[in-house]
Amino acid sequence: MLATAGTHVPQGEDWVHEVKWDGIRLLAEVSSSRVRLTTRNENDATIAWPELLEGQLEQLPRDLVVDGEVIALNERGLPDFRVLGERMHSRDPRKAARHAVAHPATFMVFDVVRLDGADLTGLSWTERRAILERLAADGALGRWQVPPTYDDGAMLHAATLAQGLEGIVSKRTASKYEPGVRSKAWLKFPHRFRASYVVGGWRPQEGTTVSQGRLASLLVGEVTPDGLLYRGRVGSGITARLSTLLRELLTPSASSPFADEVPREDVKGTQWTEPLLVVEVETHGLGTGLASGGRLRQPSFQGVRADLTPADLA
DNA sequence: TTCCGACAGTGGGGTCGCAAT
DNA sequence: ATTGCGACCCCACTATCGGAA
């Protein structure tokens, strides 16, 4: 069951609110002999997360399926997907064990789908939550955690923003569990961060030529005292109409306008432009909004800032 | 007839593993 | 030893198409 992007946080007693965890979604299936972890796309991820299973089989019910998010903390003590990135694809148990020591993960369980032969998907969220909390209170979930829920969505939204958490998820209390469905009974509200960047190049649509292909993404940079520093590409949000408009607004240049070096794979196929156009970009709201390589995380194009010049950003 | 919602496809950020160079 | 590519994770958003209004 997946959450739909919401427009405004719902209020009232029909909804509860939870922290949106910046990690990896996992389903845990417990049988009498083993615990199996699967990803959203039903790939087996059991090997990658040994510390989530350690000693668990003795504690857990013999027949259980729970839904949750695996998280790990970054250097600032906040859940951060980037910490999990390295071990996500781990197929080597010894490598996974080393990662488990360096960056121990926690399993945040927020739903229960099956218990002792009973399919719980037809129950309401409220009923499933009661079962989940009783399991936790009885110690039947071992080291797995059940994060709290909140009645006041607006409060939680503001609090998560202040604390640097990813956002919130609001859930309709009367809703059933819908496996594999992106449901409107679950609404997500990730914090997003808006900023202005300078365009220094663009790339044509994948698999097409510069002359024929439409503009697919912009290479953007941040104005700093050290010059225009490359921050990555922005493609999401550029429509066919915008694509042609942007090409008209951009002035071709023979060389890169960025002060730092642009990675080889980003240079290939790129058309450089004069650093004159300012655009608005929305990114992931955590921290600086930058990924590990100093690049924009989950960027989306929000419009041209015709009212601004690069000098305005200095 | 028009409108809306679900879904596939395209764009971004990463990592790993493996085969080819 | 290095490089390229696909398979996975995290996504935002657009375009399309069929059914509801």
Image (cartoon, coloured by chain):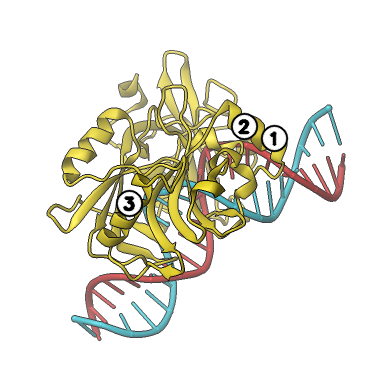
Chain colours: A yellow, B red, C cyan
Q: Chain of mark 3?
A: A
Cα distance in 3D space between marks 1 and 3:
35 Å
Could one spot residue A95 in this view of the protein?
yes
Chain letter of the residue carrying label 2: A
Which amino acid type is marked by label 3? Arg
Residue occupying the point 17% across, 47% down: A151
From the top left corner, tell me how far across and down residue A68 is, in percent. 43, 50
Q: Which mark is residue A99?
A: 2
Q: Are marks 2 and 1 in contact (CB under 8 Å)?
A: yes
Give the mark nearest the N terminus, 1 or 3: 1
Do marks 3 and 2 share a subunit? Answer: yes
The quarter in which the C terminus of chain A is drawn is top left
**Does dot 2 land on a helix, a strand or a loop?**
helix
Circle 1 SS class? helix
Dot 3 corresponds to which residue?
A134
Identify which residue, A28 or A287, lies in the foreground. Answer: A28
Whole-percent x, y for residue A300 in the image? 39, 44
- Left or right: A58 as drawn, with respect to A192: right
**Tag 2 and tag 1 share a subunit:** yes
Give the residue displayed 70% in from the left and 40% down from the top.
A93
Secondary structure beneath label 3? helix
Q: Residues within 10 Å of mark 1 (few under 14, many from 20)?
A: few
Measuring from the top left, give residue A3's x and y in whole percent.
Answer: 35, 57
Discs 3/2, front: 3
Mark 1, residue position = A95
Q: Closest to the observer: A203 or A274? A: A203
* Disc 3 to disc 2, C-alpha distance: 32 Å
Would you say A181 lies left or right of B14 here? left
Q: Within 10 angstroms of label 3, few (less than 14), some, or many (20 or more) residues?
A: few
The amino acid at mark 2 is His
Q: Give the residue type at disc 1.
A: Lys
